[in-house]
Amino acid sequence: MTDPTATATANQKLHFYQKGTFTVGNRLVPDTERSVQASIDRSNALTCGHRACQGCGEALGARYAMDAAMRATGGNLIAVNATGCLEVFTTPYPETSWQMPWLHSLFGNAAAVATGVAAAMQVKGRKEVRTIAQGGDGGTTDIGFGCLSGMFERNDDVLYICYDNEGYMNTGVQRSSATPPTARTATTPAMGPEPGNVFGTGKSVPKIAVAHGIPYVATATVADLHDLERKVMKAMGIHGARYIQIHVPCPLGWGSASHDTIRLARLAVECGMFPVFEAEHGIVTSSRKIRRPVPVAEYLKPQRRFAHLFKDGGDSQRLGHLQAIADRNIVEYKLLEPEEEAG
Amino acid sequence: MLKQTEGSHATAEAIALCRPEVICAYPITPQTHIVEGLGEMVRLGQLKNCEFINVESEFAALSVAIGASAAGARAYTATASQGLLFMAEAVYNASGLGLPIVMTLGNRAIGAPINIWNDHSDAMSMRDAGWLQLFAESNQDSIDLHIQAFRIAEELSVPVMVCMDGFLLTHASERVDIPEQAQVDAFLPRYEPRQVLDPGEPVSIGAMVGPDAFTEVRFLQHYKQTLALHLIPELAAEFSGRFGRNTGGLLRTYFADDAEMLVVAMGSINGTIKDTIDEMRADGFSIGLVNIVSFRPFPTEALRRLLAGRKHVVVVEKSFAVGMGGQLANNVDLALRNTPAAPQVHSVIAGLGGRSITRTSLHRVFRRAVAQPWEGAHFLDLNEDIIGKELHHVRKVRRSGPTAENLLRRLDQAAQHAAAE
Ligand SMILES: Cc1ncc(C[n+]2csc(CCOP(=O)(O)OP(=O)(O)O)c2C)c(N)n1
Ligand code: SF4
Ligand SMILES: [Mg+2]
């Protein structure tokens, strides 16, 4: 089999894309490199009939991620799910959308439960069976953070996927440590002299994961599903602790149109707010370059959670602050520098 | 094999004989020696085919055990006190999911004030969490109950907590009989889970359940505990046949046949109570004992049969629900509900935070139950003097400071005063 990683990188260099999507279209690549989702052999690990909102980025991201992991492991996969939208909309009793072994325990323990599953497989001599933990940003960057860090530090054989929709959506859109500054949530209302979420220090869990020195860390986005699949497949080819954070717009929580999910995810990347990168063993190895740079305002404006930034002539000071955050990402992750030629 | 060893080590050896496949370890006194012992056995290859995982919290410890158990491995962990509280959410989760995890609780008080010594407040805090709770009287009991715990857990698909008194048992060196591996293997078959995560047969476990079925799910959980009321004595009998030792099943009695007064207690205090009973019976006092081995499920029927027709029941327990009274006493009361000519129930709270329960105090309180019965809970050996002073101080001074520190200072002053005299 060809190494899908190498080909995907080569594809990126070609800079060709389907009109309007910026992703490498299946019709333009050879059969072997087509997306997992395009194959009739895909596992449909997360099948239809679930109760996610229309245009839910999390449902989309999870479906692509799981099917890619299922392909990478030949279906030998067990998923552990933290409490949150993904858990709730996929398993309304007595139905389930999961066509794979799936366990939900609690909100803050998915990483630890997955460690237990992986340990059981090890001790049972079923080393071919791999384990994924998944949860929302709240379940990952806040309440599940201790368990996550423990799993990283022990280098347990678990891939943890965080679906980052920048808030506690399942409980009605409250602020999490992944909520961007100024965003309106139910607990950071758009009121007062500085409406929306505060400018804190930020909390980049991907970076914290990199600091653990684990074998593989990546960020991905539903705006580039081919890249997402590739990263999940790559992660499943590695043993030890791995982490992927997927940016998944939430129409309900963000106050955006259902049909804008992919567009917003793409704008988040193109403005520098959501850097897409990969790291191995503590070192950032590559980042996805911005193809058509846009100001952060272009990303923020279609979302009602930022509407107060654009009222009455606009809050230029705080928009400037947000732009500065994006600019810092662009420098830090070299998002505008030309792709280095592979040696 | 007979040997003189520390309770924690004896317990660790018993657990190793049960061939656990995943052990999650997190330190907390007085439980720590158990997992340390197991860790050594795994390192030395004495305990084979076992993943020993050093986790970052008790919450993770039980969560790892949940994952392992749901994936078909025999899982074990141990904790105490604050550790049990820290894992509380997972405690309920494990039983709700019906996972046969076995956990040792090295019983210890709960803070604040922080206190590392023995009482039963930790076990009582999780009494309604859906776990079975078995209490060891001795280190031999701890060994024997742990072996039975795995079997009970796996037959019913429920988690079991084996409670052993911190320090009094965990750190006490006693002569114990450690069974042979072959004996344990014959008693405890391989773990065949009822539900398991397996790519060959994918199931979803832990789905959301609404009002349409939640009551039924809970009822079945309750029903399992009623099944345990039969299974525990059955397995105790089988165990006794194979190992020659009887753990009593749900409860054990001592001179209970003819006694007008029955004492009810749990754990290691039963030893002291038995000594006291011997002395009192020698004085012609009609007294006996019911040692509750299984607090969950609570042996309501068995207890009612035993207690009905007695004059006095004295419940001695190392925990109480603040503002309400002793949990064991409340449960005993419940067992006697609607019983004609029910005995008088006297509640004694004793041994909190490791305070010694002396035979002298027990003598006094058992006699007092007849001579001067009290209402509500009686706190054994309560230092009423410093309580009075503190209450007076609090009434007088608005910013009266932290209670625990005030009491300690008063005790210190009293000691200095006594030394000066
Ligand atoms: C210990 C605990 N605290 C709080 C909750 C309530 N709760 C359930 S889901 C959720 C929000 C989940 O947010 P996130 O992890 O970001 O996932 P999302 O729903 O956004 O996908 C919260 C707060 C809970 N179930 N358990
Ligand atoms: S609230 Fe957001 S994350 Fe949850 S199902 Fe709806 S779109 Fe998806
Ligand atoms: Mg979220």
Image (cartoon, rainbow, N blue to C red):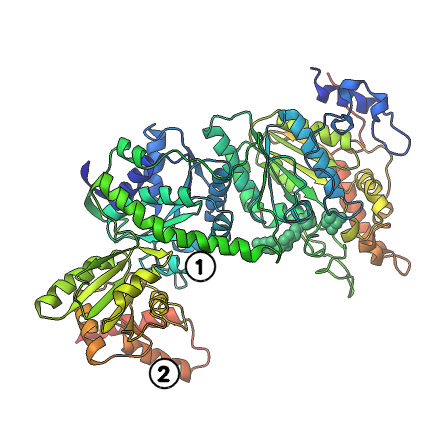
Which mark is on residue B392? Answer: 2
Q: Where residue B17 sits in the image (x, y, percent)?
A: 31, 35
Direction from residue A17 to residue B103 in the image, left or right: left
Dot 1 falls on a residue whose secondary structure is loop
Q: Quadrant of residue A47?
A: top right
Can you say whether B201 is above or below A166 in the image? above
| Rendered position, A338 above or below B65 | above
Chain on which label 1 sits: B
The quarter of the picture where the N terminus of chain A appears is: top right
Q: Which residue is mark 1?
A: B128
The quarter of the displayed image where residue B242 is located: top left
Q: Badge 2, how many Cα within 10 Å: few under 14, some, many 20+?
A: few
Sooner in the amino-acid sequence: mark 1 or mark 2: 1
The local crowd at label 1, few if under 14, some if 14 to 19, many if 20 or more residues have their Cα within 10 Å, is few
Q: Is residue A146 left or right of residue B324?
A: right
**Residue appearing at x 56%, y 48% in the figure:** A106
> Residue B357 versus residue A53: which sits nearer the camera?
A53
Q: What amino acid is at disc 2?
A: His
Disc 1 to disc 2: CB gap under 8 Å: no
Residue B229 in the image: x percent, y percent? 36, 53
